[in-house]
Amino acid sequence: QKEVEQDPGPLSVPEGAIVSLNCTYSNSAFQYFMWYRQYSRKGPELLMYTYSSGNKEDGRFTAQVDKSSKYISLFIRDSQPSDSATYLCAMRYNQAGTALIFGKGTTLSVSS
Amino acid sequence: DADVTQTPRNRITKTGKRIMLECSQTKGHDRMYWYRQDPGLGLRLIYYSFDVKDINKGEISDGYSVSRQAQAKFSLSLESAIPNQTALYFCATSDMGEGITGELFFGEGSRLTVL
C-alpha cells in the first residue's frame, strides 16, 4: 500500500458545480497537509496548506483534514473553467528534515 | 524571470547517452529537489539536498545521480539513459527551519524522451 492514495480521475463537472477531491494516507505521523494545483505544461503550485486536523477556507476553496480517518479533502465551490487542472495532495511528517510525499494527482475539467 | 529555472525544457536522446538536466534558483532557498512525473504515477522524488554538502536519495534514485554545485544550482544526471526514464522532470526548492511549511516551489519542468 502506498503511503498516499489519490484517485487520478479524470473528473469532469459543469461550471458552478461543487467539486470534492480526496486523498487517503496510511501513516499517522503525517502532520502537514497540502494541496498543489498544476496547470498543463506548468509546475505544481501550492494552493492550500493545513497543519494537523481541521478545516481551512480560502475563497472558493476549503481544505479539510480528518486525522482519525486518515483522509483529506479539497472542496471547490462554484467551480470555474479556470479551475481545470491537476490537483495533487501532499503531506509530510512533523520533522524538519523530511520531504513531501505526493499523491498521484486528480485531473479536473470544468466545462462552461 | 522565473525563480526556479530548468534547462533544457525539452530533450530527445537515444538509449545509452548521458544526459544532464540543470536547475538554478534565485529564491535563496537551501533545499533543492528533483522529481519525475509520469502519467498515472504522480510525482516521485529522485534526490534531494538540504545544503551544498548534503545529498539524499529519494524514492527512485536508481539510474540517476545529482550534483549540488552551489546553493543555487542542482543538476540531475542520467549516466546511461534508458527508455523508461522518459518522463517530465521537475526541480523544486524550499525554505528550511521549524515552523516553515516546507512549501515547494517548482520549475516549469524538463520533458525528456529516451528513444
Image (spheres, rainbow, N blue to C red):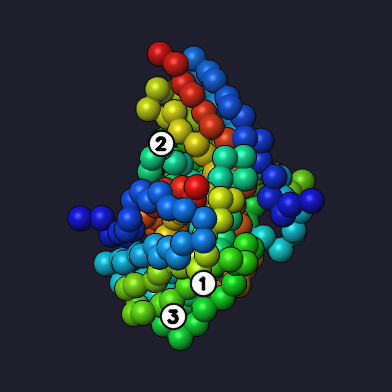
* Viewer-nearest of discs 1 and 3: 1
Q: Is residue B105 above or below residue A6?
A: below
On the rendered structure, is B39 left or right of B33?
right
Q: Which mark is residue B65?
A: 1
Label annotation for residue A40: 2
Query: Furthest residue to the right?
Result: A1
CA distance for labels 2 and 1? 28 Å
Q: Disc 2 is attached to a residue of which chain?
A: A
Query: Between marks 1 and 3, how big is the CA–CA gap?
Result: 16 Å
Q: Amino acid at mark 2?
A: Ser
* Residue A64, visible in the rendered structure: no
The subunit carrying tag 1 is B
Residue B107, horizontal then vertical, whole percent: 36, 55
Residue matched to label 3 = B51
Bin the neighbour count of mark 3 within 10 Å (Cα to Cα): few under 14, some 14-19, many 20 and up.
some
Please tell me whether mark 2 or mark 1 is closer to you in this view. Answer: 1
Of residue B67 and residue B106, the one placed in the foreground of this image is B67
Q: Amino acid at mark 1?
A: Ser
Amino acid type at image mark 3: Asp
Q: Is residue B21 left or right of residue B3?
A: right
First in sequence, mark 1 or 3: give its number: 3
